[in-house]
Amino acid sequence: MAFANVHMLPQVQPPAPAARPTEETAPSPPQSPTVRVRGFSRRFGDTEVLRDLDLDIAPGEFVALLGASGSGKTTLLRTLAGLDPADPEAVRAPANRAVVFQDARLLPWKRVWRNVALGLAGLDAADRARAALAEVGLEHRMDAWPATLSGGEAQRAALARALVREPRLLLLDEPFAAVDALTRIRMHGLVLALWRAHAPAVLLVTHDVDEAITLADRVLVLEKGRIAAEERIDLARPRDGGPAFQALRRRLLNRLGVDPGAPPPSPAQSSPPEAELLAYPTGEIL
Amino acid sequence: MSPVALLLLWELGARTGVIPANVLAAPSSVILTAWRMIASGELPWNMLVSLGRAVSGLVIGVAVGSALALTAGLSRAGETLVDPPVQMLRTLPSLALTPLFIVWFGIGETPKIALIALGTSFPIYLNLYAGIRGVEPRLVEAARSFGLGGRELIAHVILPGALPSFLLGLRFALAGSWLILVVAEQINASAGLGYLINNARDFARTDVIVVCLAVYALLGLAADAVVRALERRALAWRPAFIKS
Ligand SMILES: Nc1ncnc2c1ncn2[C@@H]1O[C@H](COP(=O)(O)OP(=O)(O)O)[C@@H](O)[C@H]1O
Ligand SMILES: [Mg+2]
């Protein structure tokens, strides 16, 4: 139950809730959503991975997307990232968006700060990269080669690289699946702090129910190509594993077809099969 | 057996007449000859001529091989235009073209340099082309997602990603240029290490031949050291080089 203990390890102390600009609870359908998907379908060969899918994400909203392995989470995220072709009528997402991939995908031949500054225009690119690295607590590693970073550090660098662009939409594809449980808890705190500071809309793809409940305003379950379930979470952050948390957890696990009566998976077991591929990333995404 | 012991044994064999001088000169006489050839300027001059051939051929070969690899690696049209003929030609040993090159270019410097250029352009082409095509697509995709495209993508992702392969090709090219140089210089040369060796052969001067062989070896070592230094600098980001 690592994720219920998030408040016990406040590595990055989240600012007071009042500091968050979009704190009003449950931003029900706002004037102009950051992401708007209507009737989107995507097929690979004969299999229709996404089928007539609808999705709205409000500005500044933190959405977690749950789903079994192979349910199409990455496909949806890639579509929102503009990495896969999509009918602009069916999928609307801001041009100013940034992705953090499960494998950090830093260019190994560029020092960390140059990775963060990748594609930034302007003379202040180096300063902005440094500031972003300071925000994720990696300023001291800015001149390091990516190969020398630990998994958690690489993901923080990837977060800095995404945030330095001040995206309106931040797309996270299982960014913590590969790091150890303790680091993951710290990363949760960091992501929340960064989200409060920059207020992007966030889509976090995860297979981890606890992670979704700990972080998100809204949890979606992707199943058979569509959003099959949705839970709004109005609990104050940091969220502990109290009764409301547990009730949500049971409902979502039920929805995912897991017996919630069973003991919660240990961090080691909660990693999906994909996590084992990380040492040699293969073509899961490509 | 240690090299020193081997040298001593060799010297002993030469002094006692077990190894006649026309079979293999004694190490001491080789060193003496080397000194004399250096002092007279004969060795430095001919070495410079050989080195000039190798470097000219290599520079042309690297330039041509790189240009072809970039054409084939960076565009589909370039690939269909360049790759099939190059893949067809690469099975031909460059040295087999010697007679044809003599017919085309005469017996001066041109056929020698052309042979080296031809022989070195293949390893450069094959490795750089494979390197460009083998750049991790996930990194390309990530860079694209951060707004890089066209020229920036080539400069920041594709070329640095292909650099290790290029340097590997350069290593092969250097070794190849050396080999071709040795053979090409055996054919009607009026200067260079090969010319010295040919002359010495006619007079059974094994001491001169050994000196020239040693120079070939030393130059080969030096070339390898240059590539290694280049790799350490250019590939400093690789885990293998980070520690040192
Ligand atoms: N480029 C592709 N070509 C063919 N099939 C793909 C491709 N990308 C994903 N798929 C298939 O689509 C399904 C959903 O994949 P994905 O979105 O990666 O799932 P998830 O991220 O939820 O694990 C899988 O069955 C996968 O095999
Ligand atoms: Mg996935």
Image (cartoon, coloured by chain):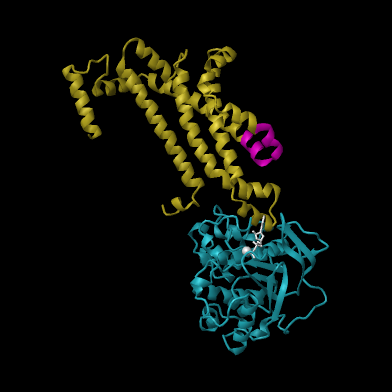
Depth check, front residue: B231 or B164: B164
Q: Residue furthest top?
A: B202
Depth check, front residue: A49 or B10: A49
Quarter of the figure that contains the N terminus of chain B:
top left
Residue A66 x, y percent position in the rendering: 65, 72
> Residue at the spot x=43%, y=36% of the render?
B224
Residues drawn in magenta? B67-82
* Residue A163 visible in the shown view: no
> Residue at the spot x=73%, y=58% of the render?
A43
The answer to which quarter of the image holds residue B142 is bottom right
Q: How many marks?
A: 0
* Residue B121 visible in the shown view: yes
Residue B79 inside the magenta-drawn segment: yes
Depth check, front residue: A248 or A108: A248
- Above or below, B107 relative to A25: above
Q: Residue furthest bottom?
A: A243
Residue B169 x, y percent position in the rendering: 52, 37
The answer to which quarter of the image holds residue B102 is top right
The answer to which quarter of the image holds residue B163 is top right
Q: Which color has been applied to chain B in this rendered view?
A: yellow
Q: Residue furthest left?
A: B16
Residue B78 inside the magenta-drawn segment: yes
In this rendering, position of residue B52 left or right of residue B134:
left
Q: Main secondary structure of the magenta part?
A: helix
- Above or below, A228 relative to B9: below
Residue B92 x, y percent position in the rendering: 54, 24
Q: Which color has been applied to chain A in this rendered view?
A: cyan
